């Protein structure tokens, strides 16, 4: 009979440890996502700067409108790909956050059921 409270206490400690671990994993994923966002922002800024430079140089060269249109089209396509990738990343991040919330809820429910 003395071992039952001890076992319950050990289970609660293990659940608490799992909860802390889940929160740490969530924090790590959050930091990774933030780094990814910063990298994508830097790439976008660089791409926009490159686009402006290309547009300026091409517009200075008269009679090269075909090349300008081609470059603009490629840049527009690159921006569309970037936006699509950004949307996918944001959706994946939302799904990850929802999974974390679900995990934390389940751990909480387990903790409650053990008590």
Image: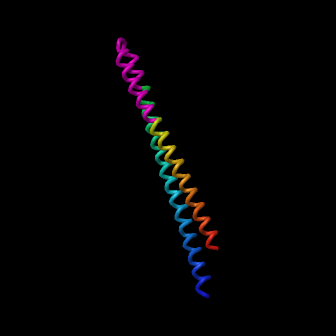
Residue at x-position 43% and y-position 27%: 76
Work out which residue is located at the far top of the displayed protein and give it: 63
Q: Nearer the viewer, residue 71 or 2?
A: 2
Choose top left, top right, bottom left or bottom right for residue 48: top left
Image point (58%, 86%), residue name: 3
* Residue 70 colored in magenta in the image: yes
Image spot of residue 108 (x, y percent):
61, 65
Q: Which of 15/54 is in front?
A: 15
The colouring scheme, among rainbow, by chain, secondary structure or one colour, is rainbow
Quick check: is 57 in the magenta stretch? Answer: yes
- In this rendering, the count of numbered labels is 0
Which image quarter: residue 72? Answer: top left
Instruction: Locate residue 52, reporting x and y percent.
Output: 44, 26
Give the answer, above or below, for where 107 lies relative to 68: below
Quarter the N terminus occupies: bottom right
Residue placed at 52% from the left, 65% from the top? 21
> Which stretch did the figure color magenta?
53-82
What secondary structure predominates along the stretch shown in magenta?
Answer: helix
Q: Position of residue 53 (x, y in %)?
A: 41, 26
The correct choice, above or below, for 96 with respect to 61 in the image is below
Residue at (40, 17) in percent of width and height? 59
Quadrant of the rendering where the C terminus is positioned = bottom right
Residue 54 percent location from the top left of the image: 39, 24
Residue 101 position by quadrant = bottom right
């Amino acid at each position: 009979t003395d071992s039952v409270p001890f076992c319950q206490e050990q289970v609660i400690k293990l659940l608490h440890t799992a909860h802390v671990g889940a929160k740490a994993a969530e924090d790590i994923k959050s930091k990774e996502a933030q780094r990814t966002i910063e990298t994508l922002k830097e790439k976008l800024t660089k791409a926009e700067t490159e686009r402006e430079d290309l547009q300026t140089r091409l517009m200075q060269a008269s009679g090269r409108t075909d090349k300008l249109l081609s470059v603009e089209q490629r840049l527009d396509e690159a921006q569309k790909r970037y936006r699509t990738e950004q949307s996918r990343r944001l959706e994946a991040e939302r799904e990850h956050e929802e999974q974390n919330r679900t995990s934390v809820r389940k751990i909480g429910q387990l903790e409650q059921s053990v008590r």
